[in-house]
Image (cartoon, helix red, strand yellow):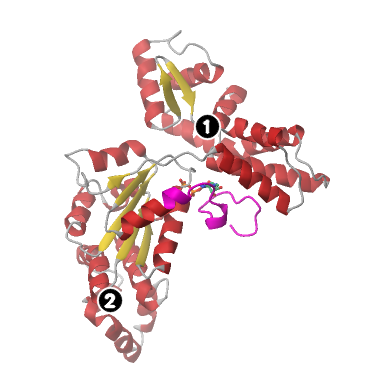
Amino acid sequence: MPGRLFPVGGPVSERDIVDREDFISSIESRLADGQSIMLAGPRRIGKTSIAYEVLRRLKERGFYTAAVDFFRLSDKREFAVSLINACLENRTGIRRTLETLKDRAKSVAGLAKLTVKFRDLEFSVDFLRDDPDEIALLDYALDLPEVLANRDKKNMVVLFDEFQDASRVAGRAEIYKKMRSHFQNHQNVSYLFLGSKEGIMNSLFGNRKEAFYRFATVLPIPPILEESWTEYISQKFAEQHIKTDEETIKEILQRTGGHPQDTMLVCSEIYYALLETGEKTVTLEYVRIGHDRALLTLAQVYDEILDEIGQRVSAREVLKRLAAGDKVYAKGNPNETKRVLDVLVSKAIIEKKGRGSYKFVEPMFQEYILREF
Ligand SMILES: Nc1ncnc2c1ncn2[C@@H]1O[C@H](COP(=O)(O)OP(=O)(O)O)[C@@H](O)[C@H]1O
Ligand SMILES: [Mg+2]
């Protein structure tokens, strides 16, 4: 989202990606070297931002790149079309090559001229029909990165975002088997897989019974260092001639725990509050206002998380106890409590600190539970 001082929501561009330089260049060089990579982590921690920046750099170095986001897709056909378009864009410079072809196909001459461009890619004109053979289309799509890279003597990197959604899009687990059977023969393509359901992703890539077992190197996403945030925040405010000091920035980070999107959001709300009053200094009072406003915006996100955990009373009870810092096993059925804790850990809502002691990954989520329940 260009134009915002502190961009929130969706991938952010290089200058607003705080503290990921080493991580980005490590992923870049591994992919360039032909290694495939998997990153799993909860939503809103910056996976897509990292991946887009990596792809941008590789493209600049002459690599072919393609990105498919399973979150946006609803069936096999859409998946195939999205992958084909993403691949062909490297040649055509057009985002939706298939749709463009289809339009031109209305005139026979126009079509001939265009398909000539793809003849070497074994492209079938049948794919332009409204009801193409779905399986043939998908098989074609899954090999296209390699075919294209080969023909054009390029190396290619393909990004699959929200990869755990592939089973929803393309029908259960078979899609993973199918993908793997194609990808494992690719010599000129490396793959970058992202997923926000860590449990599913880790099992897909780490369980020997699963199709993508050992297909990619799994890299943990590092946290953003406090110093990096401090530097970024003070600089950003300074650009707008707004003063900050160590104490107020510390307070911001204390309240957000340095969580990528929460921190951006609080800073953004502080900035808007300052714009309203015309003041030019971030004080503790503004931090409090920014934090409260950010919490209002986050309510929707947090309610969705609560929905995912389930409507069981015990889940809410355990969360309340955790948020309040009470002994988590003090009440209720211990087995049920254990089950809830496991779910919360697997969804990266809490982290284990020691025996029977846990910490919220997002302090703002903790605050939300304390205030609302
Ligand atoms: N490295 C970062 N530095 C600053 N803000 C970040 C960073 N990564 C993510 N964010 C914030 O989080 C939001 C979501 O980032 P995104 O890359 O879409 O995360 P994900 O793909 O993990 O859901 C961004 O819009 C931005 O506000
Ligand atoms: Mg994402």
Residue 98 image position (x, y, % from top left): 35, 73
Mark 2, residue position: 152
On screen, residue 304 versus residue 248, left or right, reads: left
Question: Hey, which quadrant is residue 233 in on the image?
Answer: top right
Q: Quadrant of the C terminus?
A: top right
Residue 315 image position (x, y, % from top left): 44, 22
Residue visible at 56% across and 32% down in the picture:
257
Type of amino acid under label 2: Asp
Q: Is residue 88 above or below residue 297?
A: below
Q: Secondary structure at mark 2?
A: loop
Sequence-first disc among 2 and 1: 2
Q: How many marks?
A: 2
Residue 269 image position (x, y, % from top left): 68, 43
Q: Secondary structure at mark 1?
A: loop
State the predominant SS element of the stretch in magenta: loop
Q: Quadrant of the N terminus?
A: bottom right
Q: Residue furthest right?
A: 278
Type of amino acid under label 1: Glu
Q: Is residue 15 above or below residue 301?
A: below
Residue 77 visible within the image: yes
What is the number of the mark on residue 362? 1
Residue visible at 41% across and 76% down in the picture:
93
Question: Hey, which quadrant is residue 89 in on the image?
Answer: bottom left
Q: Residues within 10 Å of mark 2 (few under 14, many from 20)?
A: few
| Pick the front one: 187 or 25 | 25
Q: Which residues are magenta?
A: 1-24
